[in-house]
Amino acid sequence: MEAKLPPSGTGPEALPHLDVIDKDTFTWEVNDIFQSIKNEQKDVIDNPGNKTPTEMRLPSALAIALARTREKYVINAEYAELANLADVILSAPEAARVQEGLNKINDRLSQLKKIAKDQPNHQLPPELAAERSSLRSQRKLEVAKILPWNHKLRDLIDTVAGVVPREEVENWIEKAMQGAGGTARKAVAGMGSEVAVARLARQVYGSDKVRLGTQAEDAKGTDMVITTHDGREVAIDIKTGGNIDDLGSRQKEVAISQNQIEGFDVREDQKRELEQRIRTAIE
C-alpha cells in the first residue's frame, strides 16, 4: 500500500489563526516535526510489535512515522498555519515522487513537440501521436494529485513571506523531500513567484481586493483574483515559466521570471514593470 497525498479539500480551515506570525514559531515547529519523524521511525524499528492494525498496512517504518507525526501535528494542531506547515512537510515525500513522474512526462512531451516541428505539417506519425495523447492524459492525472500539495505550499509561503527567508523555506522542503533539492527549489520557486505577484498586487490594490486562487480555480488556470474598483473580479493566470502544451485560457496573464524576484517579493527595480503588467491584465 503506497502513501498518498492528502485529498483535495482537506486542511486546517476550521482552526483558529495565529495572532502573530514570527520566524521562531515556525522554526521551532519545523524542528519538532522532523524530530518526531526521527523518533517515531526509531520506535517502529525498535518495537515492531507496537504497530496498530492500520500501521501494519503501511509500507515502511518511515510511512508509519509520517502517519504518527501527522496525527500529532496536523490532526491535533491548535492553529491553522501550523497545521498547514506540518501537512506540507509530511506530504513532501509523496509530492516529490509525483513530481518526478511529472518531470518524465514533461520531458517526453517536449521531445515529441520537437519531433513534430520537423514533420510535414507538424503532424506526428500515428504511433507518436497516440503516445502524446496518452501522456497528456497521464499528465492531467498527476497534476491533479500534486495540486493540493502545491496549494498548501503556496499558502505556507504566503504566510511566512517577509518573515522567514526563502532559503530557509527551501531547506525545509528539501529536508522533507529527503534530499531532492532540485525538486524542492523548483516547487518553492514556482509557488513563491505566485506569492510575489500577489504581494505586489496587494500593495497596489489593497489586501482586501487581492486573493490567491482556490484549487478549483487553479485547475481552470486562475492563480490570482483581483476585485477592481467597479466590483469586477478578474481572474489572473500567473506565468512563471514554460508550460507544456499550454493551450491557453480565458484568464488574463501576468508573466514573471525568477530574475525579477528577490526572496518572495518582486525586486524593487522590477516593480514598475510588473505593476503595469497587472494593470494591463485587468483592463
Image (cartoon, rainbow, N blue to C red):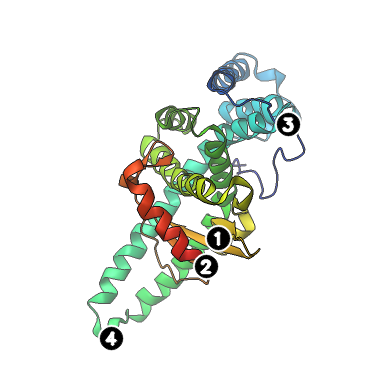
For marks 4 and 3, the one nearer the N-term is 3
Of residues 246 and 79, the one nearer the viewer is 79
Residue at the spot of label 1 = 222
**Please, what is the three-letter code of the amino acid marked with disc 2?**
Gln
Q: Which residue lies furthest to the front in this view?
A: 229
Which quadrant of the view contains residue 51?
Answer: top right
What whole-number distance in Å separates the C-alpha atoms at marks 1 and 2? 7 Å
Calculate the distance from the C-alpha at mark 4 to the C-alpha at mark 2. Answer: 29 Å
Circle nearer the N terminus (1, 4)? 4
Rounded to the nearest angstrom, the CA distance separating label 4 from label 3 is 55 Å
**Marking on residue 251:** 2
- Between discs 1 and 2, the one toward the N terminus: 1
Residue 44 vertical position relative to residue 191 in the rendered view, above or below? above
Task: Name the residue at 60% across, 44% down.
Answer: 5
Q: Position of residue 146 (x, y in %)?
A: 54, 49
Q: Which amino acid does label 1 sit on?
A: Thr
Q: How far apart are marks 3 and 1 (CA)?
A: 29 Å
Up-down relation of residue 99 to residue 134 (above or below)? above
Q: Dot 2, how many residues are within 10 Å of its Cα: few (below 14), some (14-19), or many (20+)? A: some
Above or below — where is 110 with respect to 91?
Answer: below
Q: Residue furthest right?
A: 14
Can residue 62 be seen by looking at this rendering?
yes
Residue hosting label 3: 75
Residues at marks 3 and 2, CA–CA distance in whole angstroms: 36 Å
Residue type, numbered disc 4? Asn
Q: Classify mark 4: helix, strand or loop.
A: helix
Earlier in the chain: of badge 3 and badge 2, it is 3
Q: Position of residue 48 (x, y in %)?
A: 65, 19
Helix, strand or loop at mark 1: loop
For marks 1 and 4, give the CA distance.
33 Å
